[in-house]
Image: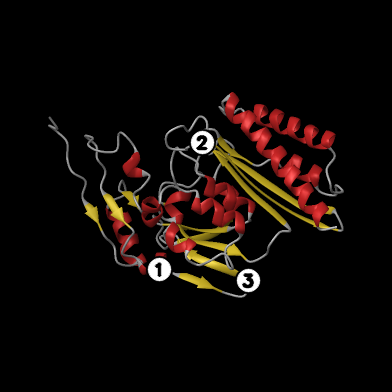
Amino acid sequence: MYEGIRSPAIHVPKSMTDLLSATSRFPNAIYWAGGTYIMSRHDYYPTKDSNDIISLNEIPDLKRINRTDRYLEIGSMVTISQLLQIGKQVLPDPLTQTLQALGTRIIRNQATIGGSLCTGDLRLAISGTLAVLRTEIEIKKLDAPRSDSRWITTGKLYDRSGALTLDKHEMITRVRIGFDREDFSIFLSAGNPMYNPQESVNLALVCSYNQSVITNFRFCFTMPTGGFHQFQDIEVLARGTMLPFSPNHIARLAKMLGEAIDNSHVTVSLLQKERAKRFFEVALHQLNTQSLIER
């Protein structure tokens, strides 16, 4: 039945040095984090060209969690459950909500933060939330003579279509989350990204204001197969606005959002577009409510 099919060889480096060596010896191998995404693909195994696997599970550097006065630094092999155990006092509220919505407890026990950011053809909510929070990502290049690294913001990991922009032998090693908090934050999600990716929509939005004047406003929509959407024109337009937004202003911004999604040239279903607009309106109305209560 499976004639001509070979089982993948599994390599288990114990350090970053071992990982560099394994990458040079097996350049076509797949980096394996928690495996929850790879194993869910219908065509992963068995296949005739089943690539070897480099497991990252035994590398201590990728499992460390460090805290300083300014930020929380998390290794890419820290699981979602381990991250949630850090507590609400440390993690921003929208990130906690996003992590809790990411699969079942069994999945969260296995899925890693690095693996969740590097899913190939499926963009998960965590990427949008971390982008809105201006999280920084350390990228290591593993096929260079030495292990070169660079730091980028989460938003630069993807293009507008949601495609991962990392090179083949680049890998996320650390995620750095700052302790700055905005005055308002919200996370909204609809649909199951695994079962109905053409219907699922996620919104993360944060806002700061001073004496009812918006000083900072950031948001990101993620749709599993419909892209990674940050619209700086709308963000800039919202800054400097006096709260509360008028109903006409909210309707105008929602209309601009719909037009921006249309102009992104990314395949988005009509349901996703409508959900995105309504999520945006809900977020702005809740922002209004909070600003009025605080007066």
Q: Are marks 2 and 3 in contact (CB under 8 Å)?
A: no
State whether residue 196 is above or below residue 15: above
Q: Earlier in the sequence, mark 2 or mark 1?
A: 1
The label nearer to you, 2 versus 3, is 2
- Closer to us: 223 or 173: 223
State the separation of the CA atoms marked 2 and 3: 35 Å
Say which amino acid is labelled 3.
Arg
State whether residue 17 is above or below residue 47: below
- Quarter residue 33 falls in: bottom left
Label of residue 70 in the image? 3
Q: Are marks 3 and 1 in contact (CB under 8 Å)?
A: no
Say which amino acid is labelled 1.
Asp
State the separation of the CA atoms marked 2 and 1: 35 Å
- Rate crowding at label 1 as few (under 14), some (14 to 19) or many (20 or more) other CA atoms within 10 Å: some
- Rate crowding at label 2 as few (under 14), some (14 to 19) or many (20 or more) other CA atoms within 10 Å: some
The label nearer to you, 3 versus 1, is 3
Say which amino acid is labelled 2.
Gly
Q: Quadrant of the C terminus?
A: bottom right
Identify the element where label 3 is drawn: loop
Label of residue 191 in the image? 2
Disc tally is 3
Instruction: Name the residue at the bottom extreme.
Output: 69
Q: Earlier in the sequence, mark 2 or mark 3?
A: 3
Query: In x, y percent, where is residue 69?
Result: 62, 75
- Closer to us: 45 or 169: 45
Query: In x, y percent, where is residue 203?
Result: 61, 43
Query: In x, y percent, where is residue 66?
Result: 50, 72
The residue identified by callout 1 is 61
